[in-house]
Every structure is written in C-alpha cells, then in structure tokens.
Amino acid sequence: MNNEYSSDVPPIKMGHKILIKDVTNISHSDIDVIINAVLTYGMCCIKGQKLEPKSLESLTMRFGEKITLPGYMTFDNYVDDYASVLRVSNIKKDGKIIENFTGAEYWHQDGDFNVGNRRRIWSFLYADIVPPVGGNTGFCDARRVLKILPKELLNFVKINQISINPNDIPDFNLNNIEHEKLAIVYHNMVEYIKNLDEYALYMGGINIAHIVGLDITKSEQIKTKIVNYLTREDNCHIHKWEPGDLVIWDNMLVYHRSMGGYANEKRLLYRTQARMFQE
C-alpha cells in the first residue's frame, strides 16, 4: 500500500439524515442522493417512512442485486412470500416473545463469508416496532479508524489477513444442515475501496475473525487492541430508532451491532440487502 494516512482526523460523519418524503416513489436523482450519502457517510437515515415488506424489497432492488439468503442463514425468519426480507426481531412469527433475546449483539460486517466484491453489500433496515427502552443499533467507522490507530497497529493491519469460518457465525443455524461445511475465507485486514480511492479496516465478524498465522491467544490480544480504537466513542454512532426510520449502510465502510437493552419489550425491524458491484 502506498497510501499515507492523514494525521488530521476529521470528526465522525455517520448518522447523516436524508430528507425524502416517500422512498416508495423516489426518482433517479433521489437514488443518486442516497448512494452519494452512503458512500460519503458510511451509513445514513431516512425518517418518517411507511414501508411494507413488498415495498422494502422493491426499493432495495433499485440499488443492486437483491440478496436472498438460504433459510439456515436466517433461522427461517424471513417474511412469508418475501424470502429476501428478514425479520430482525425478538417476536416469533406466532407473536410470542423470545425471552432475553440477544441476537447480533456483537460488532460485525454482513457478508463476511463471501469473497472479493461479493462482500460489497448494502443493508437496508426499517423500524416497524420500536421498544420503549434500548434496542439501539451501533455503527463504527471502518475508514476513520485507520487514521486513529497507532503506527504499530496500523503497520500490522496493512500486511496481515483474517480468516472467517462461516460455520462459527452465531446467527446461522448450521447444526442440522446435511451438507459439507462452508469453506473458510480469507480477507486482507485493510481493503482498498477502488471507487472511493480510500482504505477501510476489514475484520468481518470480529467475534469469530482469526488473524492468520497467530495462535488464538495472540490473535485475540491484537484484535482487542484494534477494537479498542474501532469502538472508541469518537469513532462510533449510536442510532436511536423511531418507528418509520430507514437506515442504509455499506458493510465495507462500517461495522454494526445491536446494542440490546430492551429486555422482553417488542422490537421488530425488517432488513433487506443489495449486492453492490462498484469496483
């Protein structure tokens, strides 16, 4: 890598709000506004929307190839008739609450079991039912963190790789699948985002990522040091949901996680994803 990271670190950009009245009837210029905002800020929010699974799926297809994951990658928690729309919720399809639900309460980047440009996934998350307390979603800036890492760690991530074993992803249900185990994939810890001419830290699902060539203990020690900078308050944005919020992000540019804290209060979000083939 020939890039020299600036010592002049700008403030966090995430959390930008886009003013669009109705995303179900947006123009090509609105699409461009959203794309430019996500590329600039990593994640952004469009408030006051009224979306059904069908309209959310249709919107997602305006941005790229919609992604439909197999049932064992979603706990079969997709919306009936709309397999690309995932229910992110502690509410079962029969209406019962999953007690003390802690799904996705770890920092990760969706699609880390893919390779190359197939990881260039945009996520669309829409809030239908918001709990009275907790239930926020956290985001960390994968580009800005490279500007705040100390030199020793920066030099380390520039030249090392991580491995991701998809069979270890906690939100996948692989226990009863009668097929060969999914293959381990390898990623550079610093990825060049060609269409932006920028670099981003890539660790995928941090809880399962392993630094190639190190034993488990050493890998975890170094990951902890990196994560301490990645999740620093000045490098994070916490989105506090309101019903009707639509949050869109690029999984190569930000990490995310559920912040939990909603106990057994009802929480229902709908998620779709599009594969973006920007170089």
Image (cartoon, helix red, strand yellow):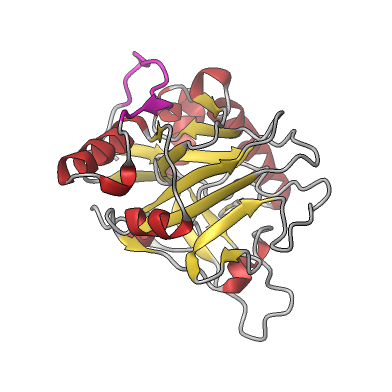
Residue in the image at 16% along x and 46% along y: 28
Give the prevailing secondary structure in the magenta stretch. Answer: loop
User: In the rendering, at what x and y percent does residue 187 appear?
Assistant: 45, 55
Reply yes or no: does residue 9 show up in magenta: yes
User: In the rendering, at what x and y percent does residue 35 appear?
Assistant: 26, 41
User: In the rendering, at what x and y percent does residue 147 appear?
Assistant: 40, 24
Reply yes or no: does residue 62 show up in magenta: no
Residue in the image at 49% along x and 56% along y: 112
Quick check: 212 above or below 223?
below
Q: Give the magenta-colored segment's residue range.
A: 5-19
Residue in the image at 27% along x and 58% along y: 277
Residue in the image at 62% along x and 72% along y: 72
Q: Which residue occupies the foreground of this view, 262 or 123?
A: 262
Is any atom of residue 119 visible in this view? no
Quick check: 206 above or below 14?
below
Q: Which residue occupies the foreground of this view, 220 or 55?
A: 55
Is any atom of residue 67 visible in this view? yes
Q: Which residue occupies the foreground of this view, 136 or 55?
A: 55
24 displayed left or right of 14: left
Residue 106 quadrant: top right
User: In the rendering, at what x and y percent does residue 217 appear?
Assistant: 73, 46
100 displayed left or right of 238: right
Name the image quarter holding the N terminus.
top left
Quick check: 49 above or below 168?
above
